[in-house]
Amino acid sequence: MAPKNLAEVPAEEVAAFVKSFDNILFDCDGVLLLGEDIIPGVKDSVNSMKEMGKEIKLITNNSFRTTREWNEIFEDVELEFTSHDVIFPTKAVIHYLQAKKFNKKAFVLGQPAMVEELKEYGIGVYDYKDCPKLKHVSDLEDYIGDDLSIGAVIVDLDFNLTYPKLMKAATILKRPDVHFIFCATDKTAPFGENYKIIGSYFIGETLEMITGRKPVILGKPSVTYNNFVKKNYKKIDPARTLFVGDSLMTDMLFATKCNYQKLLVLTGTTSYETMMSCSKEVSPKYYLRSLGDLHKLLN
Amino acid sequence: MSTPKDLSQIPADELKQFVDSFDDVFCDCDGVIFILMKVFDGVPDTISTLKSLGKSIRYVTNNSSMLRDDFAKKLQKQGIECEKDDIINPCRAIIDHLKAANFEKKVYMISLPSLRQEFEESGIKIANKYGAELCEVNATSFLQCIQEYDNDVGAVVVCFDFNMTYLNLNRALRYITNPDVKFLATGYDQRIIFSPNQFCMGPAFFHDLLQSASGRTPIWLGKPRDDFVEYIKNQPKCNPERTLFIGDSLEQDMGFAHKLGFTKLLVLTGNTTLEDLKNCDKEMLPDYYISSMAELGKLLKNNF
């Protein structure tokens, strides 16, 4: 069945829909925020959900912010959330490594914010110095060697990734006891206006291919990531949980795999046309032009 | 299709028939005449024997990591008589392709410096003369970096670069998102062998990534790709019925030669074993095989 515009269904249907869930999981980028700005109307929609007693958490694949920076952005855009309300891959990584009693260093292909956050929580991070431009292939050997102090390779979006750094990760991963963790697995990521960049999907896939290792995926749409989400609740009933997201292959697929209800918003990576022609597996029952419209339907 | 024959075991009259069946030889390099640029023992003799029998020899390699001139000189130093023009590699194929299209804009290249040098020597302008680049690592500066767009860029060439950066890949993606910008690729290998125990990911990684992220298929000039088949077909003195291809890989060499309609000879000094022939696609089966180029030379010397 084609997705229905929640803004165009009868009031009773909206009311029944809103009654059908107790928990809401919001994706952040493209749903609540665009860059550093809040999407118009979102504050009112979030507040009206809170007033109706819905328990809200945010779940994102964005590891570009530390706990402190999440608190700052919520304050800047005047959303009543704290870093405790947001689940991001770095948190899941920290939890995962702590549960494994990890006491080595992590080799991070990711953002400075991820490195900072890991260190903040007592995870050792290997201090990688960007390797100079190499003249000969034979010089490569000096920069791609193993280091036994490293016990985990973490792959996310790394703006300063280089071939030698990637190959070093591959060398390290040849030791089977090294944890291989993959966070955001997007093929491309929206960046700035009308512009996409290469997502970390390819980086992780390449490492899988050349090492033969399978990563633990701690990001949507992985169910392993959802296991971490569940740890944030005493009890959560998927059937009475609504997932609100902007992407089909990250958000809607995640919601399907986890048996959450789905609401798609068109303020992010998915166009109306793409949504209308998407596969059944990721197709939401309802969509909204913007989450900012939701509160208007409730009055 | 018949099963591949061991060239060293066939009767003398069949061997003569085989030798008489070709005038020209296209020969792969890595795993056939050398490994890591060190020529195998006996290969120079084999090459001169073939030449003394009136055969022409050209070298077809996916390796564009050095100037063709230097490549030829390395072979000469190790006793193989050859000229720069005998070397056919993806780099040369791309330059010829651009020249044939009267290309006058700039090329954005993900490649080794040698490749950029070869392009410049052929009169093609390079947008990124200095190759790989990094930027400040925060998101704002990265965004600024990738917003720079050179309108003079008319082609992106993706080969192999061990200094490759994420920024370079994103710049390449940005250019090929414009359908007017040509997208050319070289090489094919998933893995590149640097030393006996160390292999690294090859150019296939860069191609797959850019292809998948952009939704565009490159013009792909490297074995065993169809665009490269066309290129070889159009080489002077290329008569498929009278041409032998010698290689060590089933897909890249035998499959490639099959598309060209060449006679195929597999040598076992590279990445194929006889065991591999059992499960391989018909199109990739050789007509003949022999343990090495050196063995081929001995066989020819003893019989002709």
Image (cartoon, coloured by chain):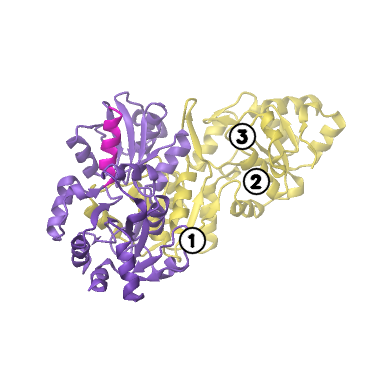
Chain colours: A purple, B yellow
Image quarter hosting the N terminus of chain B: top right
Residue B124 position in % (x across, y down): 44, 56
In magenta stretch: residue B262? no
Residue B10 placement: quadrant: top right
Which chain does the residue under circle 3 lie in? B
**A170 lies left or right of A38:** right
In magenta stretch: residue A92? yes
Residue depicted at x 57% and y 41%? B61
Q: Residues within 10 Å of mark 2 (few under 14, many from 20)?
A: many
Gap between marks 3 and 2, in whole Å? Answer: 25 Å
**Number of residue marks:** 3
Pointer 2 residue: B256
Pointer 1 residue: A279
Q: Main secondary structure of the magenta part?
A: helix
Which chain does the residue under circle 2 lie in? B
Given residues A251 and B289, the one toward you in this image is A251
In this view, the mark in front (3 or 1)? 1
**B183 lies left or right of A28:** right
Magenta part of the chain: A88-101
Q: Are marks 1 and 2 on the same chain?
A: no
Residue B12 placement: quadrant: top right
Residue A122 position in % (x across, y down): 19, 32
Which chain does the residue under circle 1 lie in? A
Q: Are marks 3 and 2 on the same chain?
A: yes
Pointer 3 residue: B81
- The reply to whether residue B129 is in sight is no
The amino acid sitting under disc 2 is: Phe
